[in-house]
Image: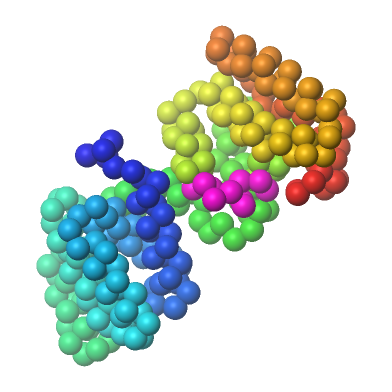
Amino acid sequence: MQMNRDISKIRKEFLELNTFLLKHYVMKEDIISMGNLALFVDSSYNRQKWLEKKKNIKEWVLQKNANELNMFMANELYEIALRLGISDNLKFKLHKMTSAYKDSSLRYFDIVLDPYEFPVWFKRMMEYFPVSNKKGLYLRILKRLENYPIFQKREEQLAVSYFAKKVFHDEKLWDILDELESLIENKTENDIAWFMAVQLFRYSYPEMEKNNRKEEQLYTLLKLKEYKALYEKKELQTCDIFSDTMKKEISNGLFRSI
């Protein structure tokens, strides 16, 4: 089932609703509430009446009817949890929430309280919440990579800093971070180093070309070719594709768009 779904689209739908609910202060910005929303989207997207459900949610929010919204979400999540065989005390939770709803005082919709039961793609995103600025993202990425010796080196940390600052503005931010998380979970230092080297090249090469940095372009291109050969031999232990000049510029914040 997971293989036949476009996780990127599901994640996009989640982010749209998540941003909308947070903007209107009808949901707490915490992992449990966001995880329940992710579970709802994951289980409802591509099913009948998805667009209608999404429309109703937005209308309740705009009408400031959090009570109705939360009861709807609670019922949906209750059915999802039953169908998937997850969580516990479901009837008790729903009964308690229904009582609050009848008193017009229901302020939450969290049915599933164990993060382990949230969708895999959301659990990968959890590692990076909240992503509020580039420095924060850099520190979270570095934290995820701390078990790999190569990322203890200053050169690699500088490369990660550049990557974080560029990916922060990328419309495919969560797709890229999801791929990185998948590599961290399942692959070796060799695979992660190659992934990072390719990402660094993808961001830096067009910038160098735009600024007519031909020597730097050639250096970076040759490094990537060298690293590809090492990667194929499963011997790659670095992602640093930048010359000393470029590293100095990145460190000093001089390289364009940093």
Colour basis = rainbow
User: Does the magenta portion include 168?
Assistant: yes
- Front-lying residue, 202 or 130: 202
- Quadrant assignment for the N terminus: top left
Image coords of residue 179 (percent x, y): 47, 37
Q: Position of residue 82 (x, y in %)?
A: 13, 56
Relative to residue 241, is residue 94 drawn left or right? left
Total marks in image:
0
Residue 227's place in the image compared with 140, above or below, is above
Can see residue 154? Answer: no
Res. 145 in view: yes
| Rendered position, 244 above or below 158 | above
* Residue 5 on the magenta span: no
Q: Which residues are magenta?
A: 165-174
Say which of 128 and 62 sits in front: 62
Horizontal relation, residue 4 to residue 171: left or right? left
Query: Hey, which quadrant is residue 250 in on the image?
Result: top right
> Residue 34, percent across and down?
38, 62
Q: Position of residue 123 (x, y in %)?
A: 39, 48
Q: Name the residue nearer the viewer: 48 or 113.
A: 48
Task: Name which residue lies at 21% across and 83% down.
Answer: 101
* View extreme (top): residue: 233
Name the residue located 14 percent from the left edge and 61 percent from the top edge: 79
Residue 197, quarter of picture: top right
Residue at the image position 31 percent from the left and 85 percent from the top = 65
Q: Residue at x 59, y 43 (%)?
A: 141
Whether 84 is drawn above or below 75: the answer is above
